[in-house]
Image: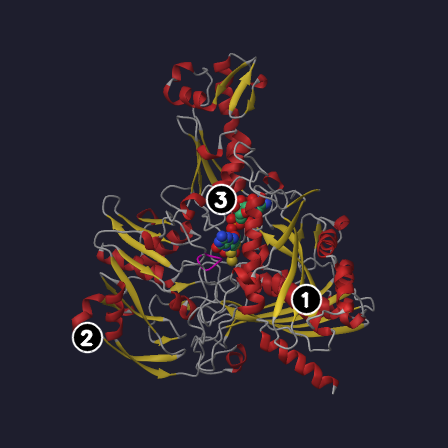
C-alpha cells in the first residue's frame, strides 16, 4: 500500500498517465462560461413548455376546463393516448407496481404532479396558458408521512394495492444464535430527513424531429442517455433506431437525472406529435416542490454486544418514505435493497436481522441521491457505534477498531454477502484520528474553552460499494440490469485518439480521466485525446453513469480497448522501423527501435493514407477497436474511508463550528488524485448540508414547506471547512489498474461524523443525544434542555 497526501495540479509538461494530477480539460469551457447546456441552446421555432401542477397532495380530478382561446396549446393525459405510463417494477417478492402517467389522469398523488402541459414561444406565455386551465378536485385523505400511510386501509395511494407499502425486504442471518451470546442490548432511533438534490441545473430537455434522419432527437440533461432512449422509444411506440438521445453539458445531477423524468416523456411526445422543437427547463421552485426527493429513512436499531462493545448481532427496522411513484429503471426497490444490504458497512459482526419497508406516501417520487442508501445506513450504524461506546464506557474509536473487518481478513464476505475486496479499515481510522490528534482534543475538552463553547470529536468509517454490476442488480430485480460496458477507441489519421463511451459525465471530469487511461497505454498526449460521450448516435451502449461505476466499467473498457490497439500500432511501427515488433518500445508517444523512432501520427498516416507502406500481414481491422468489459467480479469494489471532525458547540445559541475535518480514503489506484479530491470535497459539502441544513418539510396536508432556497438551506463556502485529505491506495484485485469507484463516498459519512462530534461535545453537559437530521441550532438547544430535565 502506498500513500500520498493531497496536493496541487501537476505542472505543464508533467506526466499525464494514471496517477497524474492533470488539470481537467473540461474546466476551460466552464470557467469561461462556454459550456453547452440545454438552456443555452437556440432553435428556430422552439416552443417553451410549462406544466400546470397539482395544488393538492391526494385528490380525484373531477373536471378539467380548457378555454377555447388556448385549446391548441394545452395537452392533457387523454390527448396522449399513444404514450404509455411509466411503470418501473422490481421482481422482488411483495413488490407492488405503480403506474405513473406522463400527466395526471383520474387523480393526483402529490403536490406538484403535472396535470396539464402548455406550450408557447416563451415560457412566460406558456405559464399564462397554464393559469387559464381550471381543474376541479375532490379531496382524498393525504398520507404525508410513513405512519399515516401504513395505517391506511382505504383510499390508498394506488387504489389497487393491498396497503401503502411498495415493498418489504427481510434479512435474517444467524441472528438468534449470536444475539443469545450478548451481554447487553443498545437501542436507538435514528432518522434522516427528506432532501432535494439541488443540482445547479435542474431538469432540462429539448426535443425535436430530425426530418433528414427521420428521428426523434431528445437533448436532455441526463446521466443515462442510452437508457432514456430505450424507455422513450418504448413509451412512445417508436423503434429505438428512430430515437437519438443527446446529453450535453450537465450542471450536476447527483442521481436526480439517472431516471426517466415524466417531463422528459411529455416533451418528447410533443416533438414526436408536432414534429417541431419543444423545450422544458425546470425552475428552482419546481425542483424544490415537485421534483423527486431522496433520503428520508427511519431506523430502529438494536445492537447486541458484549461487555467490551463487540457487536455480536444487529436487529434493525428501516422504514423509507418512497413518495408516490416508483422510478424507472432503478425502481423504488433500489433504496431499501441498498439499505438492508449495506447497513453492516465495514463491520465484521455475524448475526443480522433486518426488516426494511418502503412506504408509498403523497409526496414526489423517490430518486437515489449521491451515496444512495449508504448515507442513511452509515448514519444509523455509526450513531449506534457511538451509543455502544457510551454504554460500555469506552472511546468510540476503540469500539470501532475492534468491530471493523481487519486487514488480514481481506477479502472478506460479510453478513449480507458483500464481497469486501481489499484494504485496511482500522488503519484508515487510526490515521484519521492521528490527523485530528485525538488525544490533544480530549485534553482540550478537559481543560475547557475560554469562550465557554464545548469541543467534540466525531469519527466514522464507511464502505462505498461501487460499480456493482450484473449479479447485484439482478438480485434487486430492476427492469434494466447492467452487464458489459463498451468502449470504442480510434486513432485519427493525424495520430490523435477518439474514445467513445456510453456513460456520461455531469461534473466528474471523465473527459480528462479517461484520456489519462488511454495515454497511459498509448502515450498519446491527453490534449489530443477526445472523449466522446453522452450521445446515443455516437457512442456504444452503456446503462450510464450512476453507482460510481463509470471509471471502473467504461474506464476499464477504454483500458482494454487501448491494450488491444497497441499491438496493431506496434506491428505497423515495427515495419516502418525495419525492426521486430518485440524490439519496439513506446516512449512519449513514439515507437522506437534501433536508434530510430516513428511517432503515432506516422503510424496512423501509413494505415489510413499510405497503405503501400504497411506490412503484408497487417490487421485489416485497422486502428479502431471496440470492446465490452466488466470486472472479473461483478459484485462491486469497495472503496472505504474514515472521516474525523472536531467541532465547537455554543451551548447558548446552539451554533456549531467545524474546527477540523480529516479524511482518509482508499479508492484503490487513483487515476487522477486531483479529481478524486474534488469528488470527495464536493461530496462532503453535500454531506454537511445533510447533517446541518437540508430538509424538505411537509405539513399534514402534504404541502411542501420549503419552496425557495431561503427555506431549503444549502451549505455555502462558509459552511465547508478546509478539508484535510489523505489517501491510501490499495489496488482492487478485480479492476483495470486496481481502481475503485468513489464518486459518491464523500457524501456518505458527514452526518455520522458531525452528529458524533456534536453529541460528544454535548455529552460533557449531559445533553440528550441528537439523532435526527438536520442538526439545527434549535435541536441542539432542545437536546441540552432535555438533558437538564432528565438530570432534574
Ligand atoms: N476517479 C479516479 N480514480 C479512481 C476513482 C475515480 O480518478 N480510483 C475519477 C473518475 O475517473 C471520474 C471521477 O473520479 O472522473 C468519478 O468516478 P466514479 O467513481 O467512477 O463515478 P462516476 O463517474 O460513475 O460518477 C457517478 C458518481 C455518482 S453515482 C454521483 S451521484 C455523483 C458523483 O459521481 N454525482 C456528481 N460525482 C458527481 N460530481 C459532480 N461534479 N456532479 C455530480 O452530479
Ligand atoms: S446517486 Mo448516483 O447517480 O448513483
Q: Which mark is residue 595?
A: none
Residue lying at the far left in this picture: please name it: 69
Q: Earlier in the sequence, mark 3 or mark 1?
A: 3
Residue picked out by circle 1: 757
Is residue 486 positioned above or below 325 on the image? above
Is label 3 in a helix, a strand or a loop? helix
Is residue 788 positioned above or below 443 on the image? below
In the rendered image, residue 101, in percent from the top left (x then y), is placed at 36, 67
Categorize mark 1 by other alpha carbons within 10 Å: few (<14), some (14-19), many (20+).
many
Is the residue under label 2 in contact with that under label 1 (CB below 8 Å)? no
Residue picked out by circle 2: 67
Q: Residue at x 55, y 43 (%)?
A: 630
Q: Nearer the viewer, mark 1 or mark 2?
A: 1
In the image, the segment drawn in magenta is: 253-257
Q: Residue at x 72, y 68 (%)?
A: 386
Q: Residue at x 51, y 81 (%)?
A: 148
In the rendered image, residue 475, in percent from the top left (x then y), is placed at 57, 57
Amino acid at each position: 500500500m502506498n500513500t500520498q497526501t493531497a496536493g496541487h495540479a501537476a505542472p505543464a509538461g508533467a506526466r499525464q498517465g494514471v496517477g497524474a494530477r492533470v488539470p481537467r480539460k473540461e474546466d476551460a469551457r466552464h470557467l469561461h462560461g462556454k459550456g453547452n447546456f440545454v438552456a443555452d441552446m437556440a432553435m428556430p421555432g422552439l416552443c417553451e413548455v410549462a406544466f400546470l401542477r397539482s395544488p393538492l397532495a391526494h385528490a380525484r380530478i373531477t373536471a378539467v376546463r380548457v378555454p377555447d382561446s388556448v385549446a391548441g396549446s394545452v395537452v392533457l393525459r387523454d390527448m396522449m393516448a399513444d404514450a404509455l405510463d411509466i411503470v418501473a417494477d422490481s421482481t422482488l417478492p411483495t413488490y407492488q407496481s405503480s403506474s405513473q402517467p406522463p400527466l395526471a389522469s383520474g387523480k393526483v398523488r402529490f403536490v406538484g404532479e403535472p396535470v396539464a402541459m402548455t406550450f408557447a414561444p416563451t415560457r412566460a406565455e406558456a405559464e399564462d396558458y397554464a393559469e387559464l386551465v381550471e381543474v376541479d378536485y375532490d379531496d382524498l385523505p393525504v398520507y404525508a408521512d410513513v405512519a399515516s400511510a401504513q395505517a391506511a386501509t382505504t383510499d390508498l395511494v394506488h387504489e389497487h394495492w393491498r396497503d401503502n407499502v411498495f415493498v418489504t425486504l427481510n434479512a435474517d442471518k444467524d441472528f438468534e444464535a449470536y444475539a443469545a451470546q450478548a451481554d447487553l442490548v443498545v437501542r436507538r432511533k435514528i432518522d434522516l430527513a427528506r432532501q432535494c438534490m439541488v443540482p445547479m441545473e435542474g431538469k432540462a430537455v429539448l426535443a425535436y424531429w430530425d426530418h433528414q434522419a427521420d428521428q426523434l432527437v431528445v437533448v436532455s440533461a441526463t446521466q443515462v442517455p442510452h437508457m432514456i432512449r430505450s424507455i422513450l422509444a418504448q413509451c412512445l411506440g417508436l423503434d429505438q433506431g428512430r430515437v437519438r438521445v443527446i446529453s450535453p453539458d450537465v450542471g450536476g445531477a447527483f442521481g436526480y437525472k439517472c431516471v426517466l423524468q415524466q417531463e422528459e416523456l411529455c416533451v418528447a411526445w410533443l416533438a414526436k406529435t408536432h414534429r417541431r422543437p419543444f423545450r422544458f427547463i425546470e425552475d428552482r421552485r419546481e425542483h424544490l416542490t415537485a421534483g423527486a426527493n431522496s433520503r428520508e429513512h427511519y431506523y430502529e436499531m438494536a445492537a447486541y454486544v458484549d461487555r467490551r462493545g463487540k457487536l455480536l448481532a444487529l436487529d434493525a427496522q428501516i422504514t423509507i418514505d418512497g413518495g408516490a411513484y416508483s422510478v424507472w429503471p432503478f425502481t423504488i426497490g433500489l433504496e431499501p435493497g441498498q439499505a438492508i444490504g449495506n447497513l453492516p458497512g465495514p463491520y465484521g459482526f455475524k448475526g443480522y436481522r433486518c426488516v426494511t419497508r418502503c412506504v408509498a406516501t403523497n409526496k414526489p417520487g423517490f430518486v437515489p441521491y449521491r451515496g444512495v442508501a449508504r448515507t442513511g445506513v452509515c448514519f444509523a450504524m455509526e450513531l449506534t457505534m457511538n451509543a455502544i461506546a457510551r454504554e460500555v464506557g469506552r472511546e468510540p474509536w476503540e469500539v470501532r477498531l475492534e468491530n471493523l473487518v481487519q486487514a488480514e481478513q481481506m477479502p472478506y464476505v460479510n453478513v449480507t454477502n458483500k464481497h469486501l475486496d481489499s484494504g485496511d479499515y482500522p488503519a484508515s481510522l487510526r490515521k484519521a484520528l492521528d490527523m485530528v490528534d485525538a488525544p490533544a482534543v480530549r485534553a482540550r475538552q478537559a481543560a475547557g474553552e475560554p469562550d465557554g463553547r464545548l469541543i467534540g470529536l466525531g469519527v466514522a468509517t464507511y464502505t462505498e460499494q461501487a460499480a456493482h454490476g450484473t449479479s447485484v442488480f439482478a438480485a434487486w430485480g430492476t427492469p434494466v440490469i447492467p452487464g458489459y460496458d463498451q468502449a470504442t477507441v480510434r486513432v485519427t489519421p493525424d495520430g490523435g485518439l477518439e474514445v467513445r463511451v456510453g456513460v456520461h459525465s455531469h461534473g466528474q471530469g471523465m473527459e480528462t480521466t479517461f484520456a489519462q487511461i488511454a495515454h497511459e497505454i498509448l502515450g498519446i498526449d491527453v490534449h489530443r485525446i477526445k472523449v466522446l460521450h453522452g450521445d446515443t448516435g455516437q457512442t456504444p451502449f452503456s446503462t450510464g453513469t450512476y453507482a460510481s461505476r463509470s471509471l471502473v466499467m467504461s474506464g476499464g473498457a477504454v483500458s482494454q480497448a487501448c491494450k488491444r490497439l497497441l499491438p496493431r500500432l506496434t506491428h505497423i511501427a515495427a515495419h516502418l522501423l525495419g525492426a521486430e515488433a518485440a524490439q519496439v518500445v513506446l516512449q512519449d508517444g513514439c515507437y522506437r527501435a534501433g536508434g530510430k523512432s516513428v511517432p503515432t501520427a506516422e503510424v496512423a498516416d501509413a494505415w489510413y493514407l499510405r497503405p503501400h507502406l504497411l506490412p503484408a500481414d497487417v490487421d485489416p481491422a485497422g486502428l479502431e477497436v471496440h470492446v465490452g468489459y466488466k470486472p472479473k467480479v461483478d459484485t462491486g469494489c469497495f472503496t472505504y474511508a474514515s472521516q474525523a471532525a472536531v467541532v465547537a458547540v455554543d451551548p447558548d445559541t446552539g451554533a456549531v463550528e467545524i474546527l477540523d475535518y480529516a479524511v482518509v480514503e482508499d479508492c484503490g489506484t487513483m487515476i487522477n488524485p486531483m479529481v478524486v479530491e474534488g469528488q470527495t470535497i464536493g461530496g462532503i459539502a453535500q454531506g454537511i448540508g445533510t447533517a446541518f441544513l437540508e430538509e424538505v418539510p411537509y405539513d399534514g396536508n402534504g404541502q411542501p414547506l420549503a419552496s425557495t432556497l431561503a427555506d431549503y438551506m444549502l451549505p455555502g463556502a462558509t459552511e465547508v471547512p478546509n478539508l484535510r485529505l489523505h489517501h491510501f491506495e490499495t489496488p482492487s484485485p478485480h479492476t483495470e489498474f486496481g481502481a475503485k469507484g468513489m464518486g459518491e463516498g464523500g457524501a456518505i459519512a458527514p452526518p455520522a461524523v458531525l452528529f458524533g462530534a456534536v453529541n460528544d461535545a454535548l455529552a460533557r453537559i449531559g445533553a440528550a443525544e441528537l439523532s435526527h437530521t438536520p442538526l439545527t441550532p434549535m435541536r441542539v438547544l432542545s437536546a441540552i434542555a432535555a438533558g437538564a430535565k432528565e438530570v432534574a
